[in-house]
Image (spheres, rainbow, N blue to C red):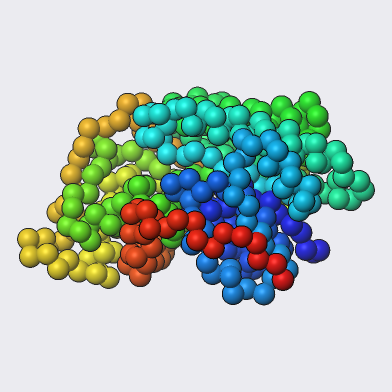
Amino acid sequence: MSKKIFLITGGAGFIGSALIRFIFDKTKHGIVNVDKLTYAGNLESSDSIQNKNHNFYAFEKADICDKDAIKRILFQYEPDAIIHLAAESHVDRSIDSPDEFIHTNIFGTYNLLEQSRAYWMSLNGSKKDDFRFHHVSTDEVYGDLDEGCDPFTEESPYAPSSPYSASKASSDFLVRAWQRTFNFPTIITHCSNNYGPFQFPEKLIPLIIMNALKAKKLPIYGNGKQVRDWLYVDDHARALLHVVLNAKIGSTFNIGGRNEIQNIEVVKKVCEVLDELFPSKHKDIKHYRELITFVDDRAGHDKRYAIDATKIADELNWTPEETFETGIRKTVKWYLENMDWCERVQDGVYQGQRLGVIKQ
């Protein structure tokens, strides 16, 4: 396969940086990383690529809502495909302040589509024929599943239940409209709940790990029986590249970890692994699970997300490599070995170091 240049939006985020690390570890493709470096984004999560002998890597600090910046980047780097991950993505934050979610996830996607379409229309021959726009979305667009119902498929109706999921559903509709109206070559994927290394410590698993090590309470919404399908982020990264290289234009795929687990069981498992790998040194705490505490549930909290990933297995021969048991052990071990990173990204010490362009 010939080498390609992928423009990845949100490449300094949790999933985006995993995708960049995967591409550099496993392929010879080049990357243009476009990210505006919000509170949850940093380039340190892609440090490992600095020592890789690859043809091309560039970082551009830019907002996908900035028409002129996106236009310049596209025509300057001439990517072969776009993998669009940039989004405001924390449900609680979307409830507290929806403005940024609407602006970035809807208007930003619109702007990226329009600038990308103009760039695509300027191409000729195989460069134009092979171009792809891969929009990365979430299972939360489907809404809530009752216990006992079959998991969401790619044909399930949308029923978003938060400002975040509503903004992502809206961006999905924009992407499909641009494909139908303008024949713009788009693909959409919906992922389940990601976890793994370099996740900003406001999400459940890293928050539980960090609080446990400090002997702080381990907060769980409601009764903790909310069900999620847990997908190890490296499996997701592998799927994203596989889809953009192999999926048909206009197709949609669900990417799931095939691990339906209640939040309370996730927290208990994290505590169990911590007990084994890093036993508590606090005199009043024998087992980390003693720190579990239940807090008032948030408004509109979905009881169950679960997606059927049969289609991507049948049509593209992709399945996750990690079980939840293996993935959570890798995750806990990584955080134990990288607590300094967790502290830096929270206390403001990280100020966008290693900006710039690396070319070889």
**Residue at 44% across, 48% down:** 40
Left or right, 143 with respect to 207, comes to right
Quarter of the rendering containing residue 356: bottom right
Q: Position of residue 213 (x, y in %)?
A: 23, 61
Note whether 134 is above or below 346 in the view shown. Answer: above
Q: Position of residue 186 (x, y in %)?
A: 73, 39
Q: Position of residue 34 (x, y in %)?
A: 62, 49
Confirm whether residue 158 shows in the render. Answer: yes
Residue most extreme to the left: 284
Quadrant housing the C terminus: bottom right
Left or right, 323 with respect to 29, comes to left
Confirm whether residue 238 shows in the render. Answer: no
**Residue at 65% across, 66% down:** 358
Q: Depth check: 152 or 210 in front?
A: 210
Q: Position of residue 137 (x, y in %)?
A: 57, 39
**Residue at 12% across, 64% down:** 282
Quadrant housing the N terminus: bottom right
**Residue at 18% across, 49% down:** 217
Q: How many marks?
A: 0
Quarter of the rendering containing residue 274: bottom left
Left or right, 95 with respect to 181, comes to left
Note whether 224 is above or below 143 in the view shown. Answer: below
Left or right, 202 with respect to 287, comes to right
Note whether 82 is above or below 139 in the view shown. Answer: below
Quarter of the rendering containing residue 64: top right
